[in-house]
Structure formats: structure tokens, C-alpha cells
Image (spheres, rainbow, N blue to C red):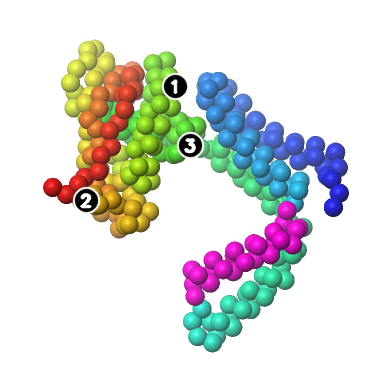
Amino acid sequence: MGEPSRGRVILWLSLLVLPIGVNIWKVGALHYGLAELAGNLGFDLAVVGLLLVIGLVNPVRWGLVHRGLWVALVGSWLIAMPPQGLWGWFGALFVAAFLALVMPHLGALTGLVVVSLVVAFSIIRFAMPGYARDEVASILAKRSPSSSAQAFVGGLANHRVFSLARERARWAVDPASVSGGEMRRLHRDIWRQLRQLKVYHVHWERLGGERIGGSGDEVVLRCSGLTAGLLHDEADRGPGMQPATTISSGLPTLGLRLGPFEITVRREPDGTYRVVKAPETVPIQPVTAR
């Protein structure tokens, strides 16, 4: 089991051009700052680097690995869809035997699979900012101060990884007024509360805002709302906590009280609003039985 040749290593490392190129485009075309670049490039290189290590080492050729994959695949399949009757078990055993013959040869496809994954990942990372920009633009197009608050806070809560969440929230703020450090602190605050409540998604469109101050094009809002948080399982809802009544999704929910908190937005020449002062915290409390 020899070491990869120098030429092979260089060939694999050349795939790093894809994520690096995508991030250079973000800086040049989308005006990402150095902090944004560091977060995005670090995430991209970590993912692609792991894939390249798999391509170089090719662990699937090792018996322990492909046998483990076989056990995991067949086991999860049998648990998800237990065979019924004689013919059901016959079909399951046939498929399991076929996979046992195929698995030892998967190592020959590792390189092709890894290259395909790197290319697909780079395409997704190239497309994500445009998708996020369009999604936020559709919210801001309502030309309502509270819509920009929804887009900003909901964007930060959109992903546990800050660099990915910021790719959405950045389109709802004035970058000269709201720093990356402020956004990072608020992202941590929101996800700290959501983790404690075991909530993985919040319907932020239920967040409303009432004007309490401001002058000229700037508006100070006090935001609050009653909404739903999604849970992975009904058992995740703590004692005394109530399911949501505002939204019917067919999924396990938790009623949530958002806010109150203050946020400042400014009207732009196109009639939309951007956040110019972020809140220190966004309180998220469960609805409990009275």
C-alpha cells in the first residue's frame, strides 16, 4: 500500500482552484469583506480538503471500511423497511448478497465520486449567494420596516454555521452600519436559545414591528410576535411548554414568543428598508400553560 505519487497529489490539490475561485468571485462581484471571505473560504476549504484526503487515501479499498459500509447500508435499510413474508425476506437477502459482491469494488470509483462531489459543492457555493439575495429581496420588496427586521433576524437564524447564515442576512443590512462582529454575537445569542429549546427552525414571518421612534428615513421598531418553532420530536417539548397554535405544519412544534426587542432600519432610495442598528439580543421564550 504505497504512498500517493507527487504528480497524483498535485493533480488532486489542483481541485482547490474551484473553491478558491468561487471566493475570489464573491469578493470581486459581491463585495464580500475580509471577515466574510475568511469564514466562507475556511468552510469551503475544510469541506473540499476532506474530500481530497478521501480521494488520495481511498479508504473504501480497505476491507474494514467497505464491510462497515455494507453493514450500515443493509442495517439501516432493514430497520427502515422491515421485510414482510417469505418473498420479502428473499428479496432482502438477494439485495444484501448483491451489495456484498459490489462493495469491494467501490474503491475503483472513489476518484470519480470525489471529483463529482467537489464540482457539485463548488456549483452550490457559487449559486447560494444569488439564491439568498433573491429570497431576501422578495421579503424587502414589501417595503415595510418590519419586513427588513424579519429578513435580518430570520437570516441569522437560517443556519447554525455563522458564515452560511451571514450569506443570507447580509442582504438585509447596511454593511457600513452593522458590523460582522455584531452579527456574529446576535447569531450566537439566537442559536444558544434555540439549542436550549431544541428548536431547529422558527417561522420568523410572524415577527411584527411597531414604530416607536426615528426621524427622516430612519425608523426605530419594537419587534415581537407569537409563532411556531419546529422540533425533531414531540418528546423534545419540555414540561409545561405548549405546541404552536399559530401555524399548522403537521410537524412537532413549540409555541414561541419572540421579543420584544428594538431594531433601527433605514429607507433606501428604492423604497426598501435596511437594518442600520442591530438589537443586542432577540428574546425567544416558549409558550407555557397558564
**Residue denoted by label 1:** 181
Residue 210 screen position, x and y as percent:
18, 27
Q: Is residue 61 left or right of residue 221?
A: right
Q: Can residue 247 be seen in the rendering of this structure?
A: no
Residue, x 57% and y 35% (percent of image)?
A: 43
**Residue denoted by label 3:** 161
Give the magenta range.
59-82
Give the amino acid type for the residue marked by disc 3 in the picture. Answer: Val
The residues tagged by marks 1 and 2 sit, at their Cα atoms, a distance apart of 36 Å
Residue 234 screen position, x and y as percent:
31, 57
**Residue denoted by label 2:** 240
Q: Would you call the spot at circle 2 few (<14 residues within 10 Å), some (14-19), or many (20 or more)?
A: few
Q: Between 13 and 26, which is closer to the camera in this rendering?
A: 13
Q: Is 61 included in the stretch rendered in magenta?
A: yes
Q: Is residue 203 above or below residue 173?
A: below
- Chain-order first, disc 2 or disc 3: 3
